[in-house]
Image (tube, rainbow, N blue to C red):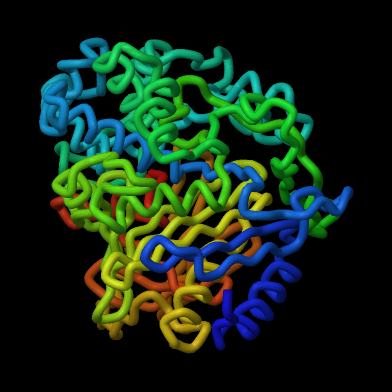
Amino acid sequence: MKMNEWEASFEDYVQRLMDDFQVPGAVIAVAKDGELTYEKAFGYRDREKQAPIDLDTVFGIGSITKSFTCMAIMQLQEEGKLSVHDPVITYLPEFRTPDEVQTKRITIHHFMTHTLGFPPLPSLIPAMLPSLQADPTAQELLQHFEAQCQHPIDTFEDLMAYIEKLPFELLGPAGTEFSYSNEAFGLLGAIVERVSGKTYEAYVQEHILQPLGMERTVFHVEELAEDDNTTMLYTCRMNDGVREVVRAPGWWDAPSMRAAGFLKSSARDMLRYADVYRTGGLSNGARIISGDSVSQMTAPHVRIDLSRSYGYGLGVLPFSEDYTLLTHTGGLKGMTAQMFIVPEAGVTGILLTNMDDAPITNLTLGLLNSMFGRPLETQFATFSEWEVPLDYLQQCPGTYKSGEGDVVEIRFDEAQRQLALVLGNDVFPLRSVGEDTFLFKRHNIDSLIRFVRHPDGEIKRMAFGSRQMPKEA
């Protein structure tokens, strides 16, 4: 494999980021037209034992699992067993939301695009309860969610019963508001199970992993038997005001939400999987889904913000004037991962790390910029300034909270006539770039937030990352 001219400067950049964020280990692999063109391991899969990483080392991929779930749904649609436009209650008659009329209108498509109208809910923590209770590094998290963790959510039926009892306000009619929903994807697993007559995990194994030859992709590392080429997990915590990265063995699991984010895989396997989207359904000599199904999965069904859209289990955004980027990240304790496909260039890539909150967006953007001959720090998109009336800015301050435990504060600086976003001890000035949309820079990455107004003009929520967070009254 010949050295690309960008590799040395990119690898210096990766090493600097890994040192800054104390990431124990990572692997990055890229293919062009299905042929491996770049692979590099950094650090260790086990820092203390200095165990090396290679293309077959198994890492968690977190929410990249969501695209596998959508692929399973598309296969079932091709077999005529369901349509993505069927109401969810056709298959899950016990599914309930706070609005009975809306419940009947929510379709599988709304689940796959995170547009069912759910705000972020606290279900994931009780869904992972047994594995959290077994994890000494999760004690603080459990204390924070103590009220929600009276009972574990072990089955799809438990998850639906839990949602039914939760007091929450829907964001809007189905199909109108995007807010990332792990619950929707957990329940897509239930639909796969009821329609196929197999467990979700067995279905994915038989219809996606086996045909693709993804022998190192599993829901439980125990399936790999004696093989120890799996990563140790690391997590960040504060110790007397100093951030440290500690060893945190034990994979978190959630039986009712496996379809939302619990696969583990290797870089080699993930490149095989990404190829399905590059080719329009083919990889490893097998047709996994039809070209039409790939087109449906990669269509920008819903806008997330000024630059990003969402297909079925995949983010869709422009990358320069000539290219589209199909991508998804994943994150959970001991893992941060990103997969990308640039179909027009025939390029697929995977980045896997063994720590939560690793700077995956910087790594991915740096890689794409290097490969496409752009300066390393070039952002995904640029935005022009937007004038905002002072009285509007004064309506925005407040505390915005999500059911998943995130808290963001917005302040207004009278002297600067500027809004600022407060995350923990960090304060980020906000720059207006569109109606209701503001930009802030964190770790050298431009991120957008959007204030969501009621028809009467009052600000009700803030779209932050990919989630809508209600404003505290």
Front residue (pair 243, 143):
243
Front residue (pair 150, 286):
286
Residue at x 80%, y 44% (from the top left corner): 247
Residue at x 41%, y 53% (from the top left corner): 328
The vertical placement of 44 against 382, above or below, is above
Residue 55 is situated, as x and y percent measured from the top left of the image, at 62, 54
Residue 272 is situated, as x and y percent measured from the top left of the image, at 43, 50
Residue at x 48%, y 49% (from the top left corner): 270
The vertical placement of 192 against 388, above or below, is above
Q: Which quadrant of the view contains residue 209?
A: top left
The vertical placement of 228 against 381, above or below, is above
The vertical placement of 6 against 434, above or below, is below
In screen coordinates, is 273 left or right of 297?
right
In screen coordinates, is 450 left or right of 11?
left
Residue pushed farthest front? 285
Q: Which quadrant of the view contains residue 164?
A: top left
